[in-house]
């Protein structure tokens, strides 16, 4: 990352031709550089913050490039916390290219991936969890993933972590104060009270850790493997859910030779459906590979739809194999072709990929299997990021070390080490303490212009 004093520019809207494109500029010279290419009634450098100005972008010899609107944001009241400008122009790739080239010729440089958001973090406009949430908002594909990202961007997790961190610092400070008066043998915090405070914090961290499974699902989605014997209607079921013909349907067993992957949003959750080859013994080399991939899909699935045909006998041996590859809690037994005469069992879902019968029940089962019976609300701090999860886990382990030190009646030095390590792990989450490697890794995942 280059020096933050540099003025940076980049296209902030998706590349490609469109009606409108926005070129973003941020840095101490943002206004000066803009005035060198912009002709309007008022100089941008003399304009008030949060105002919009109509004018033209022109070359030094007066050639007009485009009519534009320029939005002005003065530091610190901008996204980055710096002087910032957004030029709204027509979405011609040629126009965009010329404007950015002119800005660079007048002193700006091309922004690195995520550099605008990184500057917002470095200028204390947002903390690190909120910065990470920005890219999750951009990548959100379902209602649940968007709400989860907004939850983090609005600072719910940050507030919770800050509260835990503040309480730890208060306790740790009292222990370290005791160390300063070691010769007087003073005790500034009762050990029984300290144990209670630490146990309360551990309990709250554990509650956050338990949200991770749910948070990962709403962010990343659920992998669902459709498995069963050949010709039981797995591909027909996939086609019905997708509302289009995505898999070949045939009376001939073994039509599906490879794993077909499709994605669909069901009740706000992203489900990745893997239509697999029918599992059976075969000498066909290609089909045998398909069966192998089916078994791998079962191993990696969050949910397994065990699809059967109401007209066929229940394949007990295959069910036992699925139990060995997965576990019973993940498996939903589905009987297809329920529009035909049949007898129903209470533990199974009976559907018809032909008529849609029973699909609402199947969707409810999928939704429950994905999120369980949690009672999280939009005001609940949710952990969805592996980095946050690991830091919380380390913090909990350090607090447990501190508890062990207290109960072993060890000196304050040992207690302090555990408390400080726990506080440091929490600080890593919100970016109070972090390394350049972590920052570069986080912001390199952003697109240029964000």
Image (cartoon, grey):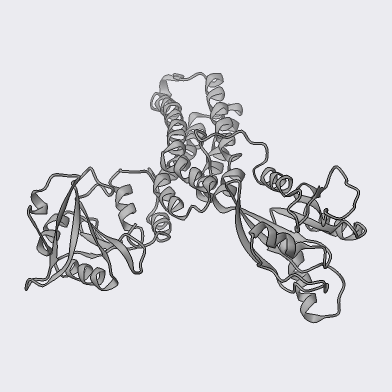
The residue positioned 78% from the left and 72% from the top of the image is: 250
Q: Is residue 316 left or right of residue 189?
A: right
x, y percent for residue 22: 27, 59
The residue positioned 90% from the left and 53% from the top of the image is: 341
x, y percent for residue 242: 64, 59
Image: 191 above or below 129: above
x, y percent for residue 27: 20, 55
* Quarter of the image with the C terminus in it: bottom left
Give the camera-side residue of 241 and 285.
Answer: 241
x, y percent for residue 314: 91, 56
* Quarter of the image with the N terminus in it: bottom left
Give the camera-side residue of 159 and 358.
Answer: 358
Total numbered circles = 0
Which corner quadrant of the image does residue 98 belong to?
bottom left
Q: Is residue 150 left or right of residue 28?
A: right
Image: 80 above or below 62: above
Q: Is residue 151 left or right of residue 6?
A: right
Which corner quadrant of the image does residue 347 belong to?
top right
Image: 70 above or below 199: below
């Amino acid at each position: 990352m280059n020096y933050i004093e540099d003025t940076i520019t980049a296209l902030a809207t998706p590349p490609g031709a469109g009606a409108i494109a926005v070129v973003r500029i941020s840095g101490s010279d943002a206004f000066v550089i803009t005035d060198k290419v912009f002709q309007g009634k008022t100089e941008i450098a003399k304009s008030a913050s949060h105002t919009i100005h109509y004018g033209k972008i022109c070359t030094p010899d007066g050639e007009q490039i485009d009519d534009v609107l320029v939005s002005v944001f003065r530091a610190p009241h901008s996204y980055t916390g710096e002087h910032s400008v957004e030029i709204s122009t027509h979405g011609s790739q040629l126009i965009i290219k010329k404007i950015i080239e002119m800005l660079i010729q007048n002193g700006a440089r091309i922004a690195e991936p995520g550099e605008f958001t990184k500057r917002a973090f470095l200028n204390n406009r947002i903390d690190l969890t909120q910065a990470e949430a920005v890219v999750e908002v951009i990548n959100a594909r379902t209602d649940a993933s968007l709400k989860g990202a907004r939850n983090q961007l609005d600072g719910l997790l940050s507030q919770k972590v800050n509260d835990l961190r503040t309480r730890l610092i208060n306790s740790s400070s009292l222990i370290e104060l005791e160390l300063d008066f070691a010769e007087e043998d003073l005790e500034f915090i009762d050990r029984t009270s300290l144990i209670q405070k630490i146990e309360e914090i551990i309990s709250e961290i554990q509650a956050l850790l338990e949200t991770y499974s749910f948070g990962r699902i709403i962010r990343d989605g659920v992998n669902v493997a459709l498995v069963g014997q050949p010709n039981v209607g797995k591909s027909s079921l996939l086609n019905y859910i997708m509302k289009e013909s995505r898999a070949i349907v045939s009376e001939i067993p073994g039509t599906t030779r490879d794993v077909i992957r499709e994605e669909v949003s069901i009740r706000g959750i992203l489900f990745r459906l893997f239509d697999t080859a029918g599992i059976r013994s075969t000498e066909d080399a290609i089909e045998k590979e398909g069966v192998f991939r089916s078994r791998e899909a079962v191993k990696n699935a969050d949910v397994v739809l065990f699809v059967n045909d109401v007209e066929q006998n229940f394949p007990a041996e295959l069910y036992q194999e699925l139990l060995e590859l997965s576990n019973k809690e993940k498996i939903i037994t589905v009987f297809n072709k329920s529009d035909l005469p049949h007898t129903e069992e209470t533990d199974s879902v009976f559907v018809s990929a032909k008529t849609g019968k029973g699909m609402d029940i199947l969707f409810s089962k999928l939704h429950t299997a994905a999120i369980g019976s949690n009672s999280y609300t939009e005001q609940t701090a949710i952990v969805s990021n592996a980095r946050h999860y690991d830091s919380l886990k380390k913090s909990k382990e350090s607090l447990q070390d501190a508890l062990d030190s207290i109960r072993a009646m060890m000196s304050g030095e040992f207690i302090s080490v555990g408390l400080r390590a726990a506080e440091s792990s929490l600080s890593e989450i919100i970016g109070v303490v972090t390394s350049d490697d972590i920052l570069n890794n986080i912001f390199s995942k952003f697109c240029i212009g964000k």
